[in-house]
Amino acid sequence: MAFEELKVAISLILDEIAKRPEDRHVLQEQLREKLSELEKMGLPAPEEIRHFEEELKQDGSEDPFDNLPV
C-alpha cells in the first residue's frame, strides 16, 4: 500500500474512533496494523498518531471494577 493510501486509511480509522468510541478496541487494532505497515516501508509514524495510540492504550488499561464497593 502506498504511503498516501496509508495516511488516508489511518485518517479514516481515527475518524471512526471519534464517531464510535464503543468500538475503540477493534479500531485500535486496525490502527496498529496500519502503523505496522508504515514501519515495514521504513517510514516513521507521525508523532501525533503515536501519542494518540498511547492515549488509547491508557484509556483501556483502567480496571473497570476499581470503584465497586467490597
Image (cartoon, rainbow, N blue to C red):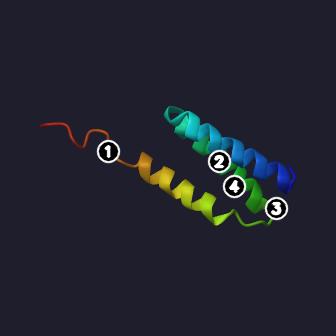
Residue extending farthest to the right is 2
- Disc 3/disc 4 C-alpha distance (Å): 10 Å
- Disc 2/disc 3 C-alpha distance (Å): 16 Å
Q: How many marks?
A: 4
Q: Which amino acid type corresponds to the residue marked 1 in the rendered image?
A: Asp
Q: Is residue 24 left or right of residue 31?
A: left
User: Where residue 52 sits in the image (x, y, percent)?
Assistant: 55, 56
Q: Earlier in the sequence, mark 1 or mark 2?
A: 2
Give me the residue at 48% from left, 55% from top: 55
User: Local crowd at mark 1 within 10 Å, few (<14), some, or many (≥20)?
Assistant: few
Q: Quadrant of residue 35?
A: bottom right
Q: Earlier in the sequence, mark 2 or mark 3?
A: 2
User: Where residue 32 sits in the image (x, y, percent)?
Assistant: 64, 50
Q: Secondary structure at mark 1?
A: loop
Residue under label 1, please give it: 63
Residue under label 2, please give it: 31
Q: Is residue 50 above or below residue 65?
A: below
- Disc 1/disc 4 C-alpha distance (Å): 27 Å
Q: Which mark is residue 35?
A: 4
Q: Quadrant of residue 70?
A: top left
User: Where residue 31 sits in the image (x, y, percent)?
Assistant: 65, 47
Q: Is residue 2 left or right of residue 38?
A: right
Give me the residue at 61% from left, 44% from top: 29
Nearer-the-camera pick, 64 or 13 = 13
Q: Secondary structure at mark 3?
A: loop
Give me the residue at 24% from left, 43% from top: 66
Q: Which amino acid type corresponds to the residue marked 3 in the rendered image?
A: Met
